[in-house]
Image: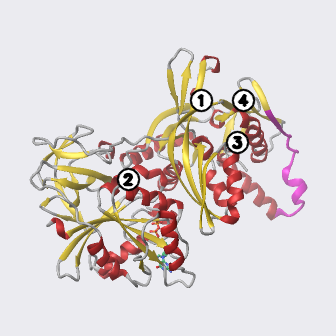
Amino acid sequence: TELSHIRNFSIVAHIDHGKSTLADRLIQLTGTVAERDMKEQLLDAMDIERERGITIKANSVRIEYPAKDGHTYVLNLIDTPGHVDFAYEVSRSMRAVEGSLLVVDATQGVEAQTLANVYTAIEADHEIVPVLNKIDLPASEPERVKEQIEDVIGIDASEAIEISAKTGQGIPDVLEAIVTRLPSPTGDRNAPLKAMLVDSWYDAYLGVVVMIRVMDGVIRKGDNIRMMQTGARYGVDRLAVLKPAMTDIAELGPGEIGVLTASIKQVRDTRVGDTITHDKKPCEKPLPGFKPAQPVVFCGLFPVDNAEFEDLRTAIEKLALNDASFTYEMETSAALGFGFRCGFLGLLHLEVIRDRIEREYDIDLITTAPSVIYQIHMRSGEQVELHNPADMPDPADIDHIEEPRIKATILVPDEYLGDVLKLCQDRRGIQLDLTYAGARAMVVYDLPLNEVVFDFYDRLKSVTKGYASFDYQLSGYRTDNLVKMQILVNDEPVDALSMMVHRDRAEARGRAMCEKLKELIPRHMFKIPIQAAIGGRVIARETLSAMRKDVTAKCYGGDATRKKKLLEKQKAGKKRMRQFGKVDIPQEAFINALKMD
Ligand code: GTP
């Protein structure tokens, strides 16, 4: 296709502002998919994505659009992931296109997540077309939201397109704007092949499918290619475009977006942002900005039932095939037995993987306290990366410890600002900026990642009744007074509950955990001390008193059915417990004990 007849774009939107619905409408209006094949939200393939309302894996579609000027254009939409954990992937997909539609829900306005992605688009030199969605709703305020886009983002919104992705109103204007307002790609057909690896995924029938954007040169079926960053070489088995069904194509030239298969075994052999070139006639330099995926949050995943360890291994291996940024290694814990230490891009990524293991593979899991990566500087001058509090060296040998920090941006309605500031302050935050956009405040905080990985999102949502939006990026490492806190139940350390904490917050944290555990652990026939300790020193203590002989006797008197119910409940509860020494600890205790109020 001629460069002037190609338009490549992505859609930037906050969760729920209507990205998928708009994409579906664009596909529908251009007849890319027959009406009867049209499923709601075609682009969100996975169940969990749909259920959680988030798009995790990038996806793309090629649309043919006969424009008013009489030419037929090829429009390539790249669907970018919508969550902070995938900021790098977003930045790469943005580099693969020339423009963005900025979709803002006209009843809601701009959110923190939108901001981050718009800035990524601006950095990639995108032309941006603002689109106000949901104008069919009486609560929509297009004029106010236009003003807000200009105030907060600083781009001209006077020609924003008002649409309803639900009713279809305004969709033809969007298609026309893509052609008239977005630039066409550039590139040299005669130069050596230079293509960006935009995304990859595992398909049960095809193996690894790689999505590429050709910058220069031409790629054809049968070509021998090389990935410049990993050095791996492959022969192209198949070349296709997504309409959105995979449709074979003879070649892809500059500006074009498509997919290839090349007998690649695992998704980990493909790195987002890598440069694909011809093995025999390579381009001079790879594309700039490549970064291998680096997990930032780690936790242990253990089967509740030890007999399920092999099933867990299979599940984890399968998931890792399709996810280059998820890492794992075997771990053994005195209390939990065999399991895996896993690394994730962020908390949401962790939750998604955990949910998939539990649901798709039906394995009950114990998740240990999430941990970030600490840089431990030893007195000997050696530097150690700590992923697991259990591996903490002897404090006597440590000179100092550095922890990762983030720059967090929070957008919140004025009335909740006080609560948000308090939350950030409580989490050792340092305020960097506070500005207003209409009735909403934008606060920027420097926070330790370790204070965010537990339940920061949950807390933020609850103190703002869901009205705050949040985004972050890693900003660097800083030395602080960090210690390892252990929890002892009945005098036995429960390694799964060990965590790194700031010294000043250790007592409060330890006390809260002991109190929580006291509620979460059922009474036994004997007294159980629950303690928090640093080194050998106990800093908090609770005692769970012994159970009376017959639990059912007192509360339920003679009512036999209720008595039976209670006993059944206890039996079901037993299954989800783990034994520590002489004490049974329910599975929920591991997660809930870590939540701070
Ligand atoms: P993620 O895929 O989760 O990022 O969300 P999204 O931005 O793709 O939003 P999605 O298209 O799933 O839309 C979110 C909700 O808003 C859905 O319930 C849609 O039916 C609804 N919705 C989308 N567009 C419109 C619209 O124009 N009007 C109305 N009334 N509802 C809409």
Viewer-side residue, 437 vs 56: 437
* Within-10-Å neighbours for mark 1: few <14, some 14–19, many 20+: some
The CA span between labels 3 and 1 is 19 Å
* Magenta part of the chain: 540-560
The CA span between labels 3 and 4 is 12 Å
Q: Considering the numbered disc 2 on the image, is that residue within a helix, a strand or a loop?
A: helix
Judge whether 504 appears above or below 569 on screen: above
The CA span between labels 2 and 3 is 44 Å
The CA span between labels 2 and 1 is 35 Å
Q: Mark 2: which amino acid?
A: Ser
Point out the frontmost of discs 2 and 1.
Answer: 2
* Within-10-Å neighbours for mark 3: few <14, some 14–19, many 20+: some
What is the x, y in percent for residue 35? 31, 82
Residue beneath label 3, please? 585
Judge whether 159 appears above or below 444 on screen: below
The CA span between labels 2 and 4 is 47 Å
Magenta stretch: includes residue 543: yes
Q: Earlier in the sequence, mark 3 or mark 1?
A: 1
Viewer-side residue, 350 vs 413: 413
Q: Considering the numbered disc 1 on the image, is that residue within a helix, a strand or a loop?
A: helix
Q: Mark 1: which amino acid?
A: Ala
Residue beneath label 4, please? 492
Residue 91's disc is 2
Q: Is residue 465 visible?
A: no
Which residue is at a point 79% across and 34% down the rendered structure image?
540
Q: Earlier in the sequence, mark 2 or mark 3?
A: 2
What is the x, y in percent for residue 532? 75, 33
Judge whether 575 appears above or below 257 on screen: above
Residue beneath label 1, please? 390
Point out the frontmost of discs 3 and 1.
Answer: 1
Magenta stretch: includes residue 218: no
* Within-10-Å neighbours for mark 2: few <14, some 14–19, many 20+: many
